């Protein structure tokens, strides 16, 4: 399977278990392909134009954050005939910073700064989308565990 992000393309094996595509809308749109076990696959920060060209695999669950810019992304998905679920974005930006620093440990003097003073070197919208997917999976696990 080939995923297209505007002019960029990435080949993903067809047996990849990514069943969730999370979108964190805003000025930049974070996209994360996540498995049902919480494994992060492909993730990228896109513009709205790039999102229009995004090829979604069949049968994936699409999650859209309810924050800034959500309405535009929802309309785009509706015009494409893609079903989606709106999820709460509360706390996703802070979670994104933590997830970012798990993948990109601080280097040099940044290591000695308190966590709250560290700043990511790039955009973290894709990690915010990943945080949305993880929150969705945690909520889903909580509701299935209750009798």
Image: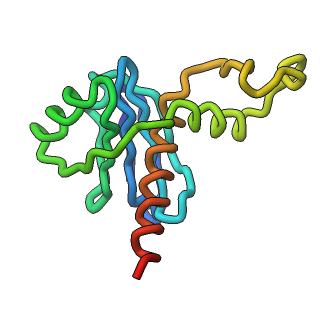
Q: Residue at x 63, y 39 (%)?
A: 99
Image quarter in which the C terminus is found: bottom left
Question: Above or below — where is 57 with respect to 147?
Answer: above
Q: How many marks?
A: 0
Q: Which residue appears at 47% of the width and 64% of the height?
A: 36
| Left or right relative to 43: residue 144 | left
Picture quarter with the N terminus: bottom left
How is the structure coloured here?
rainbow
Q: Nearer the viewer, residue 86 or 10?
A: 86
Residue 52, located in which quarter of the rendered image?
A: top left
* Residue at the bottom extreme of this rendering: 147
Image point (72%, 24%), residue name: 116
Q: Residue 32's spot in the image, x, y percent?
A: 45, 43
Question: Which quarter of the figure has residue 73?
Answer: top left
Expressed as whole percent of the image width and height from the top left, the position of residue 60 reads 31, 58
Against 33, residue 110 (above or below) is above
Q: 93 or 1: which is nearer to us?
A: 93
As drawn, 79 above or below 116: below
At which x and y percent is residue 18? 44, 58
Which residue occupies the extreme front position in the image? 147
Q: Position of residue 109 (x, y in %)?
A: 89, 17
Task: State the residue at coordinates (26%, 30%).
Answer: 70
């Amino acid at each position: 399977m080939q995923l297209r992000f505007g002019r960029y393309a990435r080949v993903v094996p067809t047996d990849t278990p990514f069943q969730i595509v999370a979108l964190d809308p805003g000025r930049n749109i974070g996209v994360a392909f996540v498995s049902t076990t919480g494994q992060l696959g492909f993730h990228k920060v896109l513009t709205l134009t790039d999102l229009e060209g995004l090829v979604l695999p069949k049968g994936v669950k699409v999650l859209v954050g309810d924050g800034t810019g959500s309405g535009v992304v929802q309309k785009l998905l509706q015009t494409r005939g893609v079903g989606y679920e709106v999820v709460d974005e509360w706390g996703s930006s802070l979670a994104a910073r933590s997830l970012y620093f798990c993948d990109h440990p601080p280097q040099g003097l940044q290591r000695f700064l308190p966590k709250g003073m560290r700043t990511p070197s790039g955009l973290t919208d894709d990690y915010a989308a990943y945080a949305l997917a993880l929150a969705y999976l945690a909520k889903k696990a909580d509701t299935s565990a209750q009798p």
